[in-house]
Image (cartoon, grey):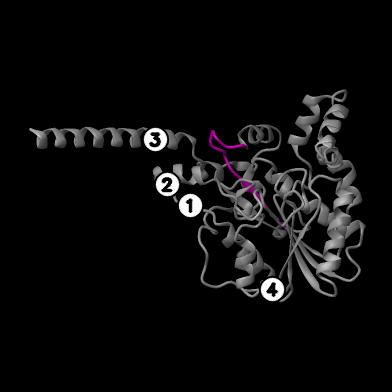
Amino acid sequence: MRFVYCQSHLKYVSRIHRDAASRFRRFASTVTNEPSGEATDPRLGDLGRTIENDYASIRDKYAAPKNPIILAHGLFGFDELRLAGSILPAVHYWRGITEALTANGIEIITAAVPPSASIEERAKALGQQIREKAAGKTVNIIAHSMTLIQNRGLDARFMISRLQAPSNVNVLSLTTIATPHRGSSIADYIFEHVGDKRVPKLYKLLESMQIQTGAFKQLTRRAMLDDFNPHTPDVDTVRYFSYGASAKPPIWSVFRQSERIIMEKEGPNDGLVSVASSKWGDNSSDYKGTLIGVNHLDLINWTNQLNWFARSLVGQSRKFNAIAFYLDIADMLAKEGL
């Protein structure tokens, strides 16, 4: 009798597990990204090449550029962040990316600047770091930012164009990744909903938290199109390359609301920056493509593991590896002779 009871109990537990797994798969299928749907958005095709599977895995071989690469970023002004001293491992901005590039024989220099000062102030700080760390060298710059106001691509453009870059460094190229070259409707949305009368109070609150507010107004679409871009022309001796990204966020994503706002105003986006705003360069070939199903944090390997776990349950394989992406950017620079 005891054996029969155990068998019945095991079957019951097994059935519960199967039902629970089935229900979670159905739930996951409703909240995971659908890359094929994004790739067919006609606006993406109009903006250039779409990239869906190219960086799913790391290739055996990549070319290395002959000159150093500067990775320009801003994680609260640090290359790494330690939340508990030496007790816990440090949080690195470029998770595994710096190590992979170095292992491929590329000299990597990282430059971090204050997170939320004005573009002009951050550009000066970026130039100072490059002046100190890359003195006498010829370099390529790759720029990405963790948040909208911490935008290293715009800082680097300002530094190269209006500060004439560091005098002791020769900048060959600037590659920007998900940079709002034409501003962002998220910045517009904030000012429209906060209102002119409340903006000073918001600034005062942020500054009391040691968050400088100089960059906020600069990132509206009007400010970028009417002021920044006309006064920040590209330099003829520097090559400019760019990438954009587009992702439909699941219900738990921090980008769910911002993606909807940008989609309505600008079209496909990565949750913070639209593809249209990311596109930069004199020639159509300078825009290297739009990464499909990739959000703003995926781009620096801060991947949402819950998102990928849910995808795996419905048979979706991982289609983007940030390390493969950056190795390919370096490969591209090498093939450009840089």
Q: Give the residue displayed 70% in from the left and 37% down from the top.
A: 266
Residue nearest the observer in this picture, 15 or 244: 15
Whole-number angstrom distance, CA of label 4 to CA of label 3: 46 Å
**What is the number of the mark on residue 312?**
2
Secondary structure of the magenta portion, mostly?
loop
Q: Please tell me how crowded label 3 is: few (under 14), some (14-19), or many (20+) other residues with Cα within 10 Å.
A: some
Q: Which mark is residue 65?
A: 4
Magenta-tinted stretch:
242-254
The residue tagged 1 is 318
Identify the amino acid type marked 4.
Answer: Pro
Which of discs 4 and 3 lies nearer the camera? The answer is: 3
Q: Which of 13 and 73 is in front in this view?
A: 13
Residue 120 point in image, percent of width and height:
89, 50
Q: Mark 3 = which residue?
A: 24
> Is residue 36 at least partly visible in the picture?
no
Q: Distance between the residues labelled 4 and 1?
A: 28 Å
Q: Nearer the viewer, mark 4 or mark 2?
A: 2
Q: In which quarter of the image is residue 139?
A: bottom right
Compared with 236, 24 (above or below) is above
Placement of the C terminus among the 4 image quadrants: bottom right
Amino acid at dot 1: Arg
